[in-house]
């Protein structure tokens, strides 16, 4: 694996992590304090949906194959 692919993958996963934090903060701002199990469910949905959304938008990294 080349250095460029590793950087691309790292940026991909950093963006996913930031999206998870953003959605959790947004949900807490809208709903208030939520249960840990609901937060875990939100994290799972975001993580699994992120790949399909990235592929759909055409921003999926090439090193992921």
Image: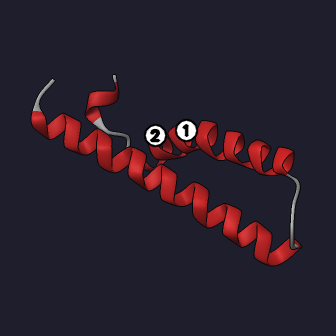
Closer to the camera in the image, 14 or 55: 14
Which residue does the image show at 49% across and 59% down from the upper left? 18
Q: Which residue is found at the position 54% from the left and 59% from the top?
A: 19
Q: Is residue 61 left or right of residue 43?
A: left
Residue on which the image places disc 2: 55
- CA–CA distance in space, label 2 to label 1: 5 Å
Is 26 displayed left or right of 37 in the figure?
left
Q: Around disc 2, counting alpha carbons within 10 Å, would you say few (fewer than 14), some (14 to 19), or many (20 or more)?
A: few
Q: Position of residue 38 (x, y in %)?
A: 84, 49
Q: Which residue is mark 1?
A: 52
Q: Residue furthest bottom?
A: 29
Element type at mark 1:
helix
**Would residue 46 appear left or right of 6 to someone viewing this image?**
right
Instruction: Please state if 49 lies on the left or on the right of 39 as rendered.
Output: left
| Residue drawn at point x = 86 percent, y = 68 percent | 33
Query: Is residue 58 visible to the viewer in this orientation of the structure?
Result: no
Disc 2 to disc 1: CB gap under 8 Å: yes
Q: Position of residue 65 (x, y in %)?
A: 34, 22
Image quadrant where residue 15 sits: bottom left
Q: Quick one: SS at disc 2?
A: helix
Residue 9, image quadrant: top left
């Amino acid at each position: 694996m080349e250095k460029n692919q590793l950087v691309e993958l790292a940026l991909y996963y950093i963006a996913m992590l930031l999206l998870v934090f953003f959605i959790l903060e947004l949900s807490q701002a809208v709903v208030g304090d939520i249960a840990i199990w609901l937060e875990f469910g939100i994290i799972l949905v975001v993580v699994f949906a992120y790949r399909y959304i990235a592929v759909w938008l055409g921003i999926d990294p090439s090193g992921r194959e």
